[in-house]
Image: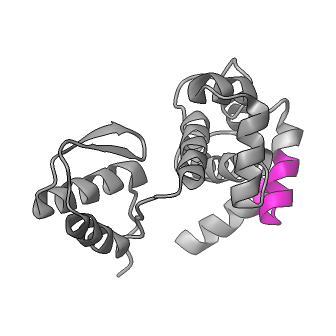
Amino acid sequence: MRLQIKYDINIACKVILQEQLEKIGIPFTVSGMGELEIDDKVSPISLIELANAIQKYGIKIIDNPKNAFVQRVKDTIIEIVHQENAQQTLKVSVYLAEKLNFSYGYISTVFSEVTHTSIENFIIIHKIERAKVLLVEKNLTLTEIAWLLNYSSVAHLSNQFKKTTGLTPTAFLRIIKKRSE
């Protein structure tokens, strides 16, 4: 028997972190997506225990400031791409600069230096992943998805979809439907 599941990775990570922090006895508060504020001084042994406990879930403590900054950039981009409300009005570059309090040039340089890819490529990958979910789970049209993801046209979305996945959106849906049968 095969079961299809749906999960929210953000909720899953928060629950895992909460369980592990409470198990070890580290007082904390969640200060933002991908950020925790430890309430008291924590021994290095407790931090190592936490790192080991969460590593099996694919969660890592980021101790390099540049890597931590890039993770904040990624989290902000994912937040933008997964907004449930209407089309965004601000450009991503402006939004990132305002949200992170750095110039977009600096953000882009650090991001590329650490990830070896551009912010634009990261955004495209996440937009296409979101488009896949919207096609399959929400049963939206390409026009609706293009509007939600702030594409200038359906053709632009379709071209990026094919360039990223190697499939047209229609071919992708056909394959998904055949697999589910």
Judged left or right of residue 68, residue 24 is: left
Magenta part of the chain? 158-171
Q: Where is residue 84 in the image (x, y as percent from the top left)?
A: 52, 31
**Is 91 situated above or below 135?**
above
Main SS type for the magenta part? helix
Identified at 17% across, 45% down, the residue is 40
Q: Which of 72 and 179 is in front in this view?
A: 72
Q: Residue furthest top?
A: 89
Answer above or below: position of 100 versus 43.
above
* Residue 38 shown left or right of residue 86 in the figure: left
Q: Quadrant of the N terminus?
A: bottom left
Residue positioned 28% across, 70% down in the render = 48
- Is residue 52 visible in the rendered image? The answer is yes
Q: Residue shown at 60%/51% (left/top)?
A: 66
Measured as percent of width and height from the top left, residue 56 is found at 34, 76
x 42%, y 64%: residue: 60
Q: Examine the image and state in which quarter residue 166 appears.
A: bottom right
Q: Is residue 141 magenta?
A: no
